[in-house]
Every structure is written in structure tokens, then in C-alpha cells.
Amino acid sequence: AFGGFGTTTTTAAPAFSFSAPTNTGTSALGSGLFNQPAQTPAQSNQLINTASALSAPTLLGDERDAILAKWNQLQAFWGTGKGYFNNNIAPVEFTQENPFCRFKAVGYSLMPNNKDEDGLVVLVFNRKEADIRSQQQQLVESLHKILGGNQTLTVNVEGVKTMPDDQTEVIIYVVERSPNGTSRRVPATTLYAHFEQANIKSSLQQLGVSLSMARTELSPAQVKQLLQNPPAGVDPIIWEQAKVDNPDPDKLIPVPMVGFKELLRRLKVQDQMTKQHQTRLDIISEDISELQKNQTTTMAKIAQYKRKLMALSHRTLQVLIKQEIQRKSGYAIQADEEQLRVQLDTIQCELNAPTQFKGRLNELMSQIRMQNHFGAVRAEERYYIDADLLREIKQHLKQQQEGLSHLISIIKDDLEDIKLIEHGLNESIPIRGGVFS
């Protein structure tokens, strides 16, 4: 169903080694854009014929030539058609690359930052990503056969990415093992040059490969040359303005967009990347939600452990008090213990003072009871409260009540402990007395 991965009959390539260096250029991005040849006489004649077709055709020899000139101009603007201008000279073919075509723009592409020694080569398949992933092992085996089936070579898949129009981008690299046991990646330019051979390229097309390119970075000299020479059919003024408007010259490079087909392709690529980014954001959002749930659970456990620690600390203090009483039993009360008793009496008085904690708690309890009573009376006389809201209010007040009851219980326990301490301090025995320090 995948086009015969592993079953396609191909002519095996002869055994070879990638060890020998091969000068194949930098990358598919750079090929065709650099080292543009100087204008040939044929190109000069083409420009002259184009100018004649647009400005002064002599095909009919009357006023109809002016109409024909306007028609040729319109075709040149469209970037399609033929411009007739002379009976003895072939018409001019108008393509979208001609300088007068209006359907052109300049966009920006991210420059690759991979080294040649990384060995990354991009293969674009006319297959869906699901098909590629389900038959990835067969793909690797088929590529290994195309490389000659050499046992010292290993094909590896770096990544798989969905592209528009049901295409898939597969990034591969090849590892070559030497007889002494060491291994290295085959340079990207060397592997790309091998894939561009006629018989190898035919075998790749049988696998569904529509495009291959080496993913290598451009040298500063290549970038400078590319920027200095406007692409064919792009006005130098527009090219200069594109360089000025480049939002990130260190990472982005201007590229021409000729025709609606190229514009649509870039829009599809942008839409695909937007979907991938949105998918990644959704995954991150789910992770954040999960982490927030874990954080809430952890905070609740921490609060629970704090309460447990406080209870255990209080129990430990009680044990220490009893242990200290037993240890000091039979000794006279010391000065620091007497001072401690005075401080405890002072604390007890402060707790029992009307304006201090115990009095405030009693006052708060009274206010809560009064508010509950008045609220019930008002609800009966004037207002109607929704049953769900009333349950929520009752639940909230119940929690408040439980909190206050728990606080009062703690205070009562503390008061009993203080009384126990006072009892131990006030206990008198002939010659020896109960001591607490």
C-alpha cells in the first residue's frame, strides 16, 4: 500500500565509500541561487525582443500594433502567454520570472544552522505521515538497499514532520563504520550528491520521494553573495527594501515568491506550522493543568502534615513536661523556675483578660449567634434564599464553627496543661518539693 517499501525492484548501486571528499556545493537551498552566470548574447536578444514586444511591435504595420503592444504588456504582467512582435522573429514566451510580472513578492525563510558533518538530508515523500511512520523500518531498509546494501553503512531517521498536501518530510543521516571500529556521519553534501545521481534519484522516486535537499548552513560569503544579487525577475529596488525590512537578518533570509501557487504553498506551510504550534501549546496547557492539580494536592498534604506536626509537637511537649517533673522530683524550686512560674501566671492572666484572646473568642461566638438569628428572622420576613445558596452558607458557617470549636479545644487543653504545671509548682513536700524547669 506504500508503493512497495522493501519490494521495489531497483538496480543496486555499486559498492562505494563515503570516505573520499566530494565537492558538491553547500545545499539545495544554495544551489541555483549562487554563481549565476553572466548574461549571454541569447539573454541579451531575449531582453531586446521582450522590449520590442511590449513597446513597439511591427507585426501588422498599422494602428493595431499599438493594441498588440498593450496586449503583450498585459500578458507580461500576468506572467503567461506569448508576445508576437515581428513576422520574422519567434514570439516571446512570457513566464512569471520575467521582470514585468506583477505577481511577485519577497518573503523570508529560516536559514539552516546544521553543520555539514551532521549529515542531515531531507527527503520529501508524497505520502501521509501515518503511512511513513507505520512503514518506517521498511523505508530504512529500502534506503539502505539504494545505498548499495553496504554493511558498514547504517541509515537513521532523525525526524518525521507533516507537510501540506499530504506530504511528509523525513530527515535522515547515514553512519559509516570504519574497519578499526570508529564511526562517523557521512557529510550531508556527500550524501545529497549521491542521491542526485540519475539511477539513485530514479530509485528514490519509486519510493515516493519528490524532493531531496541537504540541510546545511550557508557560509557568510554565500549569504553575502545571495543578498547582493537579486533573483531573476525581482526588481533590485524591491530586493533592497526586503533586506531592509528583514526582521531578523541573523536568522532569516529573503526569498522570492513568484506566482499564486508559491504564495499558496507558503500559506499552507504556515498554516501547518500554526497547527503544530497549537498542538504543542495544548500539550503544554495539559501539563500545566496537571502540575497545578499536583501542586494543589501537595499544598493540601503540606497543610495536613503541618497540623500533624503541631499536634505531635504538643504531645512531645507534654511528654517532656512529665519527664522533667519526674527528673526534678525531690529537688528544691530554683530561681529560674520561680521566674518561669511568674511568666506563666502572667500569660494566664492575659488569656483570661476580657480584651484578650479568650474574651475576643467569646465575643465573636456571640456575634455569630446573633447574626445567625437575625439572618434567619430577616429571611422569614423579607427575603427568599435559594436552597443551594443556603446550603453553601450553612456549610461555610459550619466550617467556621468547627474552626472556632477546634481553637477553643486547643485553648482548653493549654489551660489544663498550665493548671497541671501550676499544680506541680505549688506542690510542697517536706524538705523536697516538686520542681519544673
Image: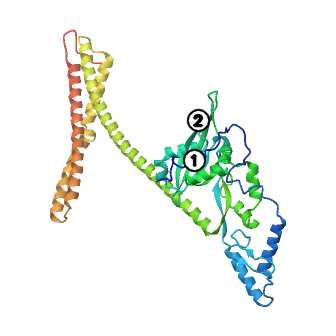
> In the figure, is residue 72 to the left or right of 262?
right
| Label 1 CA crowd tier, 10 Å (few <14, some 14–19, many 20+) | many
Residue 280 on image: x %, y %: 48, 51
In the image, which disc is placed on residue 151? 2
Which colouring convention does the figure follow?
A: rainbow
In depth, the one of 46 and 288 nearer the eye is: 46
The amino acid type of the residue labelled 1 equals Ile
> In the figure, is residue 416 to the left or right of 198?
left
Specify the farthest residue to the bottom: 63
Specify the farthest residue to the top: 431
Task: Report helix, strand or loop for mark 2.
Answer: loop
Mark 1 or 2, nearer chain start: 2
Q: Say which residue appears at 57% left-offset and 43% top-offset.
A: 145
Residue 95 on image: x %, y %: 70, 71
The amino acid type of the residue labelled 2 equals Gln
Q: Which residue is mark 1?
A: 171
> In the figure, is residue 8 to the left or right of 431?
right
The answer to whether residue 284 of the structure is visible from this angle is: yes
Task: Report helix, strand or loop for mark 1.
Answer: strand
Residue 173's place in the image compared with 435, above or below, is below
Q: Say which residue appears at 55% left-offset and 52% top-offset.
A: 207
